Amino acid sequence: MAHLAAANGASLEGRIRVTAALVLLIFGGFIVRLFHLQVVEGEMLRQRSQKNSVRHVDLDAPRGEILDREGRVLATWRPSRALRVIPNDLADRTRTFAALGQLLDTPGADLDRMAGPSTGLARFRPVTLVPDLDWERLARVESHGYALPGVETFEQPRRFYPAGTLAAHLLGTLGEIQAVQLEKKQYAGYRQGEVIGQTGLEARFEAQLRGRVGRRDVVVDAAGREIEKLRELPPAVGGRVILALDRDLQEEAEAGFRAVPEGEPERMGAAVAIDVRSGDVLALTSFPTYDPNVFSSRIDSKTWRGLVDDEWKPLRNRAIQNHYPPGSTHKAVMAGAALQEGTIDTNTRVFCPGYYYFGGRRFGCWKKEGHGSVNVIQALQRSCDVFFYTVGVQLGIDRIAKHASSFGLGDTTGIDLPGE
């Protein structure tokens, strides 16, 4: 029994020695690794930690679609590739923009100016230089990306109007948010450089169409290349807006303006078709027009100047921003006023010889031979000028103005469009 106890004691002592040796070996390994990290690789790791950084990238949200009453798309979005720079990450600003200029067929000095200053907080802010790269230029930049630290391409949703100029003034335009707009309460939460609706329905329903901006947190190296994606909150597409507009009627209205003899310019003016039972605007067009796709990203100065300086003012929505004499449509107002005031009744007749004298001047009817004896119903049916000249004199200017005002003449319609 004593011999057995001695043997067990020796075995336990051996196991303790082995365990102690393993512990020492492990700690020795830790010490060696720590020495290697701090002394041997210390400088390299320090530089790498300084060069790598976490970047927060905003992900633009696609704008919601605009549809006609039948669900046909008038405005949607498409993916595109854009190019941006981060001034602080540019290794050699002069050489980088010179190289970019050759790759993009754009003067490097222009790109440098667009990038803005490299001082203060602005140097950390990404600046988009080309909002929509074609495939050829995209391939050039991507193939030289390794030599262009601080330059990157990224996916960006872009507004797209599949029918081109159709209903352009109704749909409206986009543009970068302005400094004065950023100060307004309605644009709280927007950021500099964000594209918003500036005119038309794009502006009127900005809150519904905007969507929710996403965010991606990534680790990047000194060249601006993504090393690791930490987390991502995807963007949310904006809401849909469904209009009372009928695309077929809109196309017919615009075709009427273009139906001119060969060699002559398109007609100028506006046309609006309204369902009198509901007040729905079924078509609204203004000519001359423009392609809203040129505003879907940053519009170049040449295109902008061409639109602004055009003597025919294609950006003006003549349906809501111009004044026109009411013409014969005012005869219905006159008839209503005269009947309500008791100046005439449905049996009152006026003889139309084709002209009317007032203030020593002869005013002709559109029908030179005259309409003969007509009552108010016949006068409206035949658009007799002399009947309403006569009624107008009997009513007097004050009562005409009062009833014209009650019909809404001289006031805005309240249509859901800004700038009326």
Image: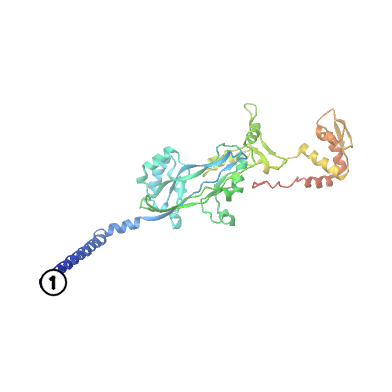
**Residue furthest to the bottom:** 2
Secondary structure beneath label 1: helix
Name which quarter of the figure residue 291 lies in: top right
Residue at 57% x, 57% y is: 183
Of 298 and 25, nearer the camera is 25
Dot 1, how many residues are within 10 Å of its Cα: few (below 14), some (14-19), or many (20+)? few
The image's colouring method is: rainbow
- 376 on left or right of 261: right
- 29 on left or right of 403: left
Which image quarter is the N terminus in?
Answer: bottom left
Relative vertical location of residue 237 with respect to residue 354 in this rendering, above or below: below
Q: Position of residue 28 (x, y in %)?
A: 21, 64
Please name the residue that numbered disc 1 is placed on.
5
Q: Position of residue 82 (x, y in %)?
A: 45, 44
Q: Position of residue 164 (x, y in %)?
A: 56, 37
Relative vertical location of residue 276 with respect to residue 178 in this rendering, above or below: above
Tally of marks: 1
**Residue furthest to the top:** 262
Q: Position of residue 219 (x, y in %)?
A: 38, 54
- 352 on left or right of 61: right
Of 231 and 385, nearer the camera is 231
**Residue furthest to the left:** 3
Evaluate whether residue 107 shows in this view: yes
Q: Amino acid at mark 1?
A: Ala
- 268 on left or right of 44: right
Name which quarter of the figure residue 69 lies in: top right
**Residue furthest to the front:** 1
Evaluate whether residue 362 shows in this view: no
Name which quarter of the figure residue 382 lies in: top right
